Image: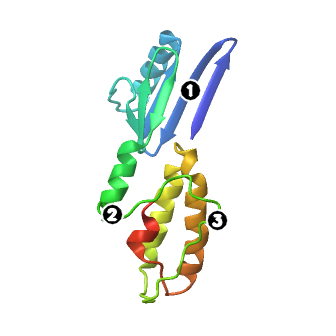
């Protein structure tokens, strides 16, 4: 849940996700007031400047904030056992077609759904892979409805 408080030129933002809260403002007094109020109601531990949150790596510079998911992507490769899989360039050709696995092996639908969700989350910081992920999602929609699969490792290796 996102909360925004704006007074004149001052902005305070708080993001709550389950039991984690990320908050900030250019005005340090507003930040301290928020910490004081929240500490009276909840047990809190402050970890300082935000550097990692929900799979996002965050780097704060003087005039910009950089957000990446490099570690998240590396962890996906390991999670799905794709360290040695072939990869393709992104964005892929608009004429790229996924092909059916000739062996017609059955698939673990939960695994495919997990891959799709993970890829969709990754597009939040990687719009350059959105088309490739979209092609994959459309191709796997058919697979999830039927027990015949694409070769798992090859189809996921983007």
Q: Is residue 153 above or below residue 70?
A: below
Mark 3 is surrounded, within 10 Å at the Cα level, by few (under 14), some (14 to 19) or many (20 or more) other residues, namely few
Quote the CA–CA distance across marks 2 and 1.
38 Å
Image location (x, y in percent) of residue 134: 60, 61
Residue located beneath label 3 in the image:
95
Residue located beneath label 1 in the image:
13
Q: Mark 3 falls on what kind of element?
A: loop
Q: Nearer the viewer, mark 3 or mark 2?
A: 3
Mark 1 is surrounded, within 10 Å at the Cα level, by few (under 14), some (14 to 19) or many (20 or more) other residues, namely some
Image location (x, y in percent) of residue 75: 33, 53
Q: Nearer the viewer, mark 1 or mark 3?
A: 3
Q: Earlier in the sequence, mark 2 or mark 1?
A: 1
Q: Is residue 89 above or below residue 148?
A: above
Residue located beneath label 2 in the image:
82
Residue, x 44% and y 66% (percent of image)? 156
Front residue (pair 142, 102): 102
Q: Mark 1 falls on what kind of element?
A: strand
Query: The N terminus lies in which quarter of the figure?
Result: top right
Q: Is residue 23 above or below residue 156?
A: above
Left of 95 or right of it: where is 118? left
Q: Are marks 3 and 2 in contact (CB under 8 Å)?
A: no
Q: Earlier in the sequence, mark 3 or mark 2?
A: 2
């Amino acid at each position: 849940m996102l909360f925004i408080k704006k007074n004149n030129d001052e902005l305070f933002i708080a993001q709550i996700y389950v039991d984690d809260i990320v908050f900030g403002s250019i005005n340090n007094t507003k930040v301290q007031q928020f910490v004081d109020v929240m500490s009276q109601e909840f047990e809190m531990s402050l970890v300082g400047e935000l550097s990692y949150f929900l799979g996002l790596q965050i780097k704060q510079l003087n005039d910009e904030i950089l957000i990446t998911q490099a570690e998240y992507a590396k962890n996906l490769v390991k999670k799905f056992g794709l360290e040695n899989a072939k990869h393709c360039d992104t964005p892929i050709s608009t004429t790229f077609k996924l092909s059916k696995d000739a062996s017609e092996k059955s698939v673990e639908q939960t695994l495919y759904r997990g891959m799709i969700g993970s890829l969709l989350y990754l597009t939040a910081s990687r719009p350059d892979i959105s088309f490739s992920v979209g092609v994959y999602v459309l191709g796997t929609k058919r697979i999830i409805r039927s027990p015949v699969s694409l070769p798992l490792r090859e189809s996921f290796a983007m």
